[in-house]
Amino acid sequence: MQELDTLVVTAEVQAAIRRLVDRLGVVCVESTPRWSSIVDQLDFGSTYERPAVPGTTSTVVVLGLPADVLKHARDATDTFGFVMPVARIATSQIPGLGQRARSWRDDATLDLWHEGWSPINIDRLLVTTRDATIELVIGDVRPIPEVPVPND
């Protein structure tokens, strides 16, 4: 998603980030180098640590593509937050290329369920870039509790 370099961080995006930080407390943002410019644009407030400070308790917020969030989910053991793009909507129509309608099966947050995480407090926002509109999902997840299944 080359467009992310020109992401326009709106007041609505900042409000969603503030709500996320209010829920999670001290946060440590993890991202790939590709996302560092976006981390710098987002205001995680005075509780933001990068990298995590030893001896403090902070909650990880993963900033990246759905694959980055799922990679973290596979190894995580505690609640974490995420900021990820889940859809790209072209703003300039290219002749001959139509926009395929997304179905609920295309939603990356459902992959978190499959990995054993329950998405909570989800904000879905449309943000603009120079070439497209991106659907951005900001939220947090907690482990799905293991419920014992009674024997038949």
Image: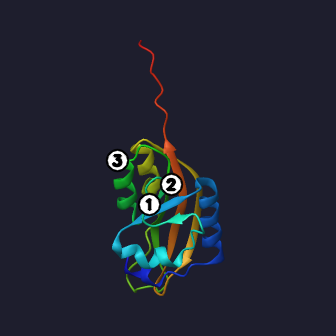
> Could you tell whether 47 is left or right of 111 in the image?
right
Disc 1 on helix, strand or loop?
loop
Task: Write down the quadrant of residue 35 in the picture.
Answer: bottom left
Label 2, on which residue? 58
Quadrant of the drawing holding the N terminus: bottom left
Residue contact at pointers 2 and 1, CB within 8 angstroms: yes
Mark 2 or 1 closer to N-term? 1
- Residue type for callout 3: Asp
- Residue type for callout 1: Ala
- Residue type for callout 2: Ser
Label 3, on which residue? 75
Label 1, on which residue? 52
Residue 137 on image: x %, y %: 52, 63
Q: What number is the disc on residue 30? A: none
| Residue most extreme to the front | 55
Residue 104 on image: x %, y %: 48, 54
